[in-house]
Amino acid sequence: MLKKAYVEITNICNLHCAFCPGTRRAPRSMTPDEFSLVLDKLRPRVSYVYLHIMGEPLLHPQLGTLLSLAAQRSMKVCVTTNGALLADQAETLLRSGALYKISVSLHSIEENGGDPAAAEQYLDAVWQFSVLAARQGIIVALRLWNEGAADAGNPYILDELHKRSGLSAWAEPRKNSFRLAENLYLERERAFCWPDLAADTAPTQFCRALREQIGVLVDGTVVPCCLDHEGDLALGNLFTQELDDILSSPRATAMFEGFSRRTPTEELCRRCGYATRFNI
C-alpha cells in the first residue's frame, strides 16, 4: 500500500542551488484540471501528496487553487520549498486547510552569495512563517541536508536558529531531528548523491520506491520515486492511464520484486546515493 505520492506541480525554479541537479526537461506547470485528475487517480491509494520533485512549488501561479483541490478531497499536502517565497505565499499556505507539513531547505541560503543582510532577511522570513504554521498545527521541518558538502553556512544558520528559538539546546526526538518548538523541527543529514546514469555504482540493495511512494512529473509521467528528476524510469502516464495499470506493468512489477530481493533491476537504481541510507 502506497503511503505517499510526490507530485511535481511545476519543474520551474527561482534558484540554482548546488545540491539540486535541476532538470533538462522543458519548463512546464501542471494545470488545475491536470492536478485534479492526478488527485482523483491517486486518492484510492494515497492520502499524503508531496508537492516536490523538481521545481519550486511556491512558484506555481495557481497554488491556492491546487491546495483547495486537495482539501476538497481530504488529502493531506506536504510541501518542500527553498523558502525564498514563503513571505509571499504565507497567506495562501496557512489558509488552505490542506497543508499538513512543510519542509524548508535551509541550505538554499547559499544562493545569497555570502550577503549577510540577505541571509538574515531570508531566515527572518522563514522563521516567522514557521512559527505561525507550527502554532496552527502544521508540522514544519527546517532542513540542513548538506553536511559534508556545501555546508560552510551551517554554523551561522544554527546560531541564528538558537537565537530565534530561545533555546541553548534542542531535544532530539529521533535520529538527526531536533525539536525547536511544538510542531517545529530541525532536520540534519549528510549530503547525498542523486541517482545518475553517469555516476558510479552504489551499494544499493533495497528501496521504498513503489512500496511506499511514487512520483508524478509535471507532464503526468509516473516514476518510482522523487529522485528520478529526468523521468529515466518512466512507468506510464497518469493523465492517460489508471494507476493500477501502471503499477502492474511489467517494468514496475520487476522493479518491486527486485527491491524485495535486494537486487535492483534498473541501472539508475544501482547508481543512487540516497538509497544507500536504507541499508544502514
Image: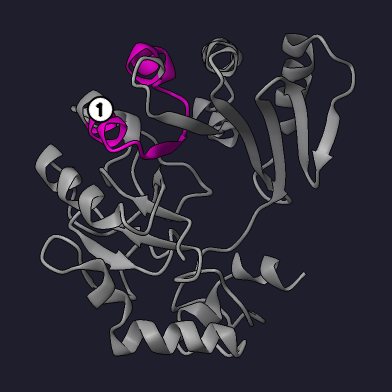
Foreground of the two, 228 or 63: 63
Image quadrant holding the C terminus, namely bottom right
**Number of marks drawn:** 1
| Residue 115 in sight here | yes
Magenta residue span: 66-93
User: Residue, x 15% and y 69% (percent of image)?
Assistant: 241
Residue identified by numbered label 1: 68
Q: Residues within 10 Å of mark 1 (few under 14, many from 20)?
A: some
Residue 77 to residue 232: above or below:
above
Secondary structure under the numbered disc 1 in the rendered image: helix
User: Residue, x 80% and y 9% (percent of image)?
Assistant: 166
Q: From the top left corner, tell me how far across and down residue 4 is, in percent.
A: 44, 54
Q: From the top left corner, tell me how far across and down residue 278 is, in percent.
A: 68, 69
User: Residue, x 23% and y 57% (percent of image)?
Assistant: 41
> Is residue 186 part of the magenta span, yes or no?
no
Q: From the top left corner, tell me how far across and down residue 123 is, in percent.
A: 59, 17
Residue 148 to residue 195: above or below:
above
Q: From the top left corner, tell me how far across and down residue 238 is, in percent.
A: 19, 63
Q: Mark 1: which amino acid?
A: Ser
> Is residue 88 part of the magenta span, yes or no?
yes
- Is 30 situated left or right of 48 in this image? left
Residue 118 to residue 269: above or below:
above
